[in-house]
Amino acid sequence: MGAPILTGWLAGDTSAGLMASIGGFTALYGSGRPYFSRALQLAVIVSAFALSVGVGIWVAPISWAVVVAVAALAMIATWLSNALQIGPPGAYMFTLACAAGTAMPAAHIGPVGAAVLVLGGGTFAWAVHMAGALISYRGPERSAVTSAGRAVIGYIKSIGTAEESAARYRAAFALHRAWTTLVNDQPSQVPADGPVARFRALNRELHLRFAEAMSDASRHQTPRPQLVEDLHKLIEQARDPQSLPSLSGNTTPLGHPSSGAAMLEALQPGSNPMRVIVRVGVAAALAGALTAIFHFERAYWAVAATVLMLHQGFDWLRTLQRSTERLLGTWVGLLLAGAILILHPQGVWLALTVMALQFTIEMLVIRNYALAAVFITGVALTIAAGGHPVEDAGSYLWARGIDTLVGCVLALVVFRLIPPRATTRHIPEQLARALRAVADTTDHLAHGEVTTPEARKCRRELQLASFALTHAYEDSLAASRGQRFAAEELWPAIAAVERLAYRTLSTCWALEQLGADAARETAASMFVNDGAAHVRRVIDEFVAAILYDGALAPLPVLPHVLEPELVDVRECLLRRAPSSELSD
């Protein structure tokens, strides 16, 4: 962010340099991605920043167009950011960039010129962010595999303790994230004997060890002592995986769904992702309309505050906490911004000021958001001032404070009007989703065909369904008292279904290790007497009991490999209260 400001100052147009520095926000995204994927993602983000600022300046003179444009921008940015999992700071920065750019006193630049300047600053940020490829091009892949290995070790050490369930989830998620890095974030075709294929082979070995540990834990056995030692050796091999054979394509698990599928899934009517998008759009439109009606100087600041509160889809308590932190941080930050505007740094000092503010934000934003908001306010208003002296700094700062207050209050009001789906509906739906995924995966498991494209899709859906179930339960713990009570009533069933899901997945990995012929023979011995059909019938009864309070018939003879887990699920469902009694 400092380089464009210095360039603009040296060229005699500090406002142009500050406008270009908005593109520097590009550097906040893409960390941890493989460099090929990162290059593409950051290029799209650079273009989005340029478009946001250009369109914002273009519609700024027309009040009604401002409302429509910023609401549409907020909704599209929220949709794509969440669906494509671009990570923090997500959709908020695009609205903030639009606010800072349009508030800047730089009429001589114009919409097209502003977009070009932001694109130039973003291109420089792209180059800086990609510089690590010159040192360690496969560093992100190595880091993902290493983190997965350490998570598996943590799980093994936790077996038999109260932390076992949480550690198992962390290990499964780390392995899944590594597969996403090694599969989804790579070109469609990679060399069969190249480094990516070898990292895949290494991650597969980690996953096999994880499956072995889960299998031992499900039988209440202690994993063999050499298992942790084996994992340490595998992690060490991540430094140079050349000694491992590459992994053939038909045994490579799938990571996240494709971008198109993720975007379509986020638009499902009534889903929580869709509710977040609608919530952001309604709040942004209301903020823009109110600021236009009451003739606030700029609608963008209020809209930026609403988007910040709502775009991540937090529950009510976290949204309320974030609103309070943002409001307090902003009002204290106005003092910092006022001091900077009074000092009016120029040239090198202006660049150093913006760099220091942004550096401080990155150091604080995870640990203490309220304190980070102080510096976020300072850097945003410093850029928005465009390097020019502010004649009435008090009114300028007061307006920004009121805009933030309006945005935060509106965000809370809209959240209450369009709340997330209630736990009494959401958790049962996620339980049913996970159970159906178990049944679909079992169909392939019973034939010993666990590496076909369809089988891999079912295994991926089962993994994602188990993650979604965990997230639904965690979200409920921060919801209303009634929803917390409903979630606690369902917790035994949630835990039992999670164990069933992981048992199914670990069995798939065990069969995969045997090879095609041996896997089919082993599966046939495990699922005798139409065992897969019995599993599906039992799971259908479980789903009916969860969603419609259906009755549970006595269990038939079940495959031994899944019998303990299915029995546990049934006992938990028998003990739970009917859904009609779990009020919100």
Image: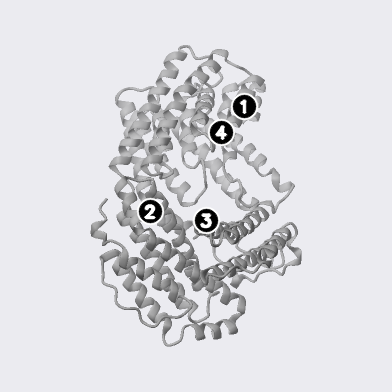
Kindly indicate whether the residue at mark 2 contacts the one at mark 4 (C-beta within 8 angstroms). Answer: no
Pair 4/1: label in front: 4
Kindly indicate whether the residue at mark 4 contacts the one at mark 3 (C-beta within 8 angstroms). Answer: no
Pair 3/4: label in front: 3
Q: In this figure, which residue is indicated by the disc labeled 4?
A: 364
Pair 4/2: label in front: 4
> Does 255 appear above or below 2?
below
Q: Amino acid at mark 1?
A: Ala
The residue depicted at 50 percent of the width and 85 percent of the height is 524
Q: In this figure, which residue is indicated by the disc labeled 1?
A: 356
Q: In this figure, which residue is indicated by the disc labeled 2?
A: 267
Determine the residue located farthest toward the left in the rendered image. Answer: 580
Q: Which residue occupies the foreground of this view, 381 or 558?
A: 558
Which quadrant of the view contains residue 212? bottom right
Q: Earlier in the sequence, mark 3 or mark 1?
A: 3
User: Does the rendering let one see residue 190?
Assistant: no
> Does 218 appear above or below 488?
below
Q: In this figure, which residue is indicated by the disc labeled 3?
A: 163
Q: Amino acid at mark 3?
A: Glu
Q: CA distance from mark 3 to mark 2?
A: 36 Å
Q: Position of residue 92 (x, y in %)?
A: 46, 38
The residue depicted at 69 percent of the width and 51 percent of the height is 139
Is disc 3 placed on a helix, strand or loop? loop
Kindly indicate whether the residue at mark 1 contacts the one at mark 3 (C-beta within 8 angstroms). Answer: no
Is disc 2 placed on a helix, strand or loop? loop
Is disc 4 placed on a helix, strand or loop? helix
Q: CA distance from mark 3 to mark 1?
A: 40 Å
Q: Earlier in the sequence, mark 1 or mark 2?
A: 2
Q: 10 Å neighbourhood of mark 4: few (<14), some, or many (≥20)?
A: some
